[in-house]
Amino acid sequence: MVEETAAVLAAPRPRSPGGSRRLIGTPAAEAILVPLGALILSLLLFGLFVACAGVNPLAVYRYMVEGSVGSWFSVQNTLTRAAPLLLTGLCTALPAQAGLMIIGNEGAFVMGGLAAAAAGVALRDAPSFLALAAMAVAGTAAGAVWIALAGSLRHWRGVNETISSLLLNYVAIAILNQLVEGPFRDPQSLNKPSSPSIGYAHMIGSIPGTEIHWGLAVGIVVCLAASILIRRTTVGFATRITGGNLKAARMVGLPIGRLVMLTCALGGAAAGLAGMIELAAVQERASADLITGYGYSGILVAFLARQNPLAMIPVAVLLGGIGASGGLLQRHLGLPDAATVVLQGIIFIVILASDAVYGRVPWLKPAAART
Amino acid sequence: MSGGGLGWWIVPLAVLGGAIRVSTPFLFVSLGECITEKSGRINLGLEGTLVMGAMSGYAVSYISGSPWLGVLAAGLVGTGMGLLHGTICSLQRVNDIAVGIALMLFGVGLADYLGKPFIQPAAPQLPSLSFGWWSSSPDVQNALKINELFLVGVALVPLLVWAFRATRWGLILRIVGESADAARALGYPVIPVRIIATCCGGFLAGIGGSFLSLYYPGAWSERISSGQGITAVALVIFARWNPQLCFYAALLFGGAGALGPSLQGVGVHGGYYLLNAAPYILTLLIMIVTCSPKRRLLGAPAELSITK
């Protein structure tokens, strides 16, 4: 009984009886126009919100455009911020295919970064490619274990995965803080406890001609791979059946437990990889700075993209742009840095509410559903 | 802090005092969530409501000079958040868990935004009653200083038990939570009842938040709540939707949360962060023990999405 509702709950989107409205095969009009409309409504609501705070909304919009795509510098800033979101978003989107609603992205990100730091410090004197490979393996493995834990609790103990994965976030952060203040602390880090450095030589560089690190390319490739896995493989098909109709999946004898564990582990691995890249491309050493909020934004990316890894690419860029414009809003208009979080929250709420619109707007209805 | 002749006895004493202090927000949020879940909806956004309550309670207490006005304001802001959740979830095909996640992020962000000006100034705090007058030890007195809001929460427990069991309102709430169809057949409006229940839950969660900023830890800051709201939601599940069990569970959680600071008080510094994570680990462990994939939880409202 327990799993059934969860399956219905976390199903990527409600399906019409004819099955005409699928993830990617969706008739473009509704799938694109409804989220777009929700986005515009969110921006208007945000404008109203800042207007109440005494700030000119038009100026806010202008600085948001300027801060996200206004110059080469801001474009690079946007894309750099989009890179981790591509991976942390998968941490919600992949388990969602099997009907689970995981929000432990931040914890998997932190554990990935921490494990990568441990591997990187241990292999400081090893050749660069070896150190980086070990860090990637450690990071993905840590993230995978972290989310698989929530998945297995769900499958074998019936523990609600949304709550358990959220609680695991706080446990991960506690482990990070405990280690970088204790056994894993670099004695030289006085003011801000942090781990020893992984060594500058072993850091991930930038894509030639830009300041954007390679994480962006990795993120796009992983999203494409995830999309192929879901849409074009037997495993992906079985997973989507599990997520769409658990009873049917059980009746045809699908290995539900294994599918749940697999998607959770893969999602966690993606978030862990994001943590590893954040560490190896940006931070160099593990510290409380690994708590970036990329995990929480990743949840929003997945929901905004309706759990579709391909759609996550533009959505991550969009949210990266919102994040990138925060600095300008703060500098020029004196808005607190939480302003972008408020906007994200508004978008999240409006997008979820827009679920009610599907199939209700006559001229947007997919042709198949109309007959 | 010296042991004052009590030595290690200070630890259980401090845990007891801390349990009472730390448990108050857990108690209010879990009682509120209990009302909401009895109606068949789950509101994971109470984490955001808690933080919004902490911020608005502190701000109003600072501006008006009256902490109790702050508590009321926090409750009203919480009601507003509950109304938002309840209304959006009433739209067709909108998932209540997802809306809860959204409101959690939104509430925390909004509280950070609006609370910026109130990080520095000191607002008047809630009063507390001293039950340790009989002892000359300052540690005992300290541990037995009990906040009035906690007593309000304690009084709410039997009130809710009675209301669920014996009043017309309680019965309607339970019918809606057990079977929406039956409620409809009896002529009770399902959606308005659920919206009202979510508002009540938000009201109590907001009050729980005001306790954070107005008594313990006693100041508004951006990281004032780290998961207390969500822990309290989990707490309702293994308290089996029973207000009385919610009370004991809240005390247990408070005690777990107070363990770290009390051990630090006697000079044990190892594992500080891990001890602070004790409530989360405890929640996970209890959920692992009490949940089962084979049967529905005892006492769970049948319309509740997470247990159906």
Image (spheres, rainbow, N blue to C red):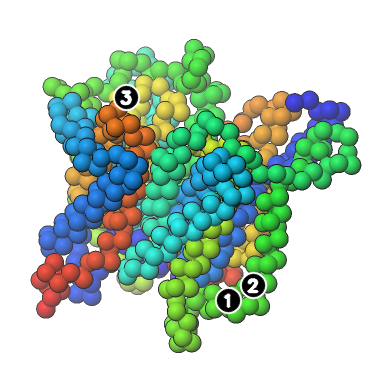
Query: Which residue is located at x 42 percent, y 73 percent?
Result: B191
Query: Which residue is located at x 88 percent, y 34 percent?
Result: B136
Q: Secondary structure at mark 2?
A: helix
Where the C terminus of chain A falls, by quadrant?
bottom left
**In the image shown, does A146 or A208 lie closer to the viewer?**
A208
**In the image shown, does A161 or A247 lie closer to the viewer?**
A161
Q: Is residue B166 left or right of residue A67?
A: right
Q: Secondary structure at mark 1?
A: helix
Residue that lies at the very extreme toward the top in this rendered image:
A188
Query: Is residue B183 in view from this perspective?
Result: yes
**In the image shown, does A31 or A135 lie closer to the viewer?**
A31
Which mark is drawn over residue B169?
Answer: 1
**In the image shown, does A92 or A73 lie closer to the viewer?**
A73
Mark 2, residue position: B163
First in residue order: circle 1 vs circle 2? 2
Q: Nearer the viewer, mark 1 or mark 3?
A: 1
Q: Secondary structure at mark 3?
A: helix
